Image (tube, rainbow, N blue to C red):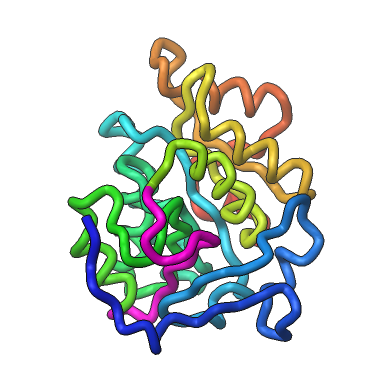
Amino acid sequence: MNIKLNKNKIKTITLEKESYPEKLKNIYNRPQTLYVLGNEELLNEKSIAIIGCRNASDYGLRSAYKFGYELAKKGVCIISGFARGVDTYSHMGAVAAKGKTIAVLGCGLDVIYPSENLELYKQILINNGTIVTEYPLGSKPERYHFPARNRIISGLSDGVLVVEAKEKSGTLITVEHALEQGKDVYAIPGNITSKNSYGTNELIKEGAIPVTKIDDFNI
């Protein structure tokens, strides 16, 4: 789904500009250009990325919303990828708290993907949030865009919270980026019989910080 945008409202930030986010300057394969709608100052704010399954369980969706809301209430910017499931609910929690949130897209700013998130897209901007991508206008949500987008999600954050992740999950690509970038990795413990919690439980066994309440974050 494409929407018409006022091109004058889109900020183009290249690596050479002073406004290029400090957090992205030293990551591997840093984006050369960012296209930004909304409040570009959020790109340098204290932030937590919340990531997880697209086909999340009710437990995962409620957890994403809860921590999106509670962190945003504390003034922490919530970063996610605007996908179905955990991403959507973490953004929704931040918006409900009237807090800060950044959506990192795997397509152009004029392409709403998934299409059912059109209202959320609008609410993020109305709420002084930020929508950002490295892809120019008209770029479709190609499958290979999303793993690449993940390095920006982790790169802009001060830590990454994994809500749900299957054994072989694209979510774990973001975790790998976060670890390479020296970011804290948090994970929500899950039911040991749930496929969606396999990845989070394994991350905790490997040293990720378990999260059950807002005070568990090092922020």
Q: Quadrant of residue 195?
A: top left
Residue 23: x percent and y percent? 72, 66
Residue stretch rendered in magenta on the structure: 126-140
Q: Is residue 197 above or below residue 98?
A: above
- Residue lying at 50% horizontally and 44% vertically, measured from the top left: 145
How many numbered marks are there? Answer: 0
62 left or right of 188 in image: left
Q: Is residue 106 above or below residue 163?
A: below
Question: Foreground: 7 or 165?
Answer: 7
Q: Residue furthest front?
A: 138
Q: Quadrant of residue 17?
A: bottom right
- Residue lying at 54% horizontally and 27% vertically, measured from the top left: 200
Question: Foreground: 138 or 43?
Answer: 138
| Overall secondary structure of the magenta section | loop
Question: Foreground: 108 or 171?
Answer: 108
Q: Is residue 168 above or below residue 40?
A: above
Residue 96: x percent and y percent? 27, 66
44 left or right of 129 in image: right
Q: Is residue 94 above or below residue 189?
A: below
- Residue lying at 67% horizontally and 22% vertically, measured from the top left: 205
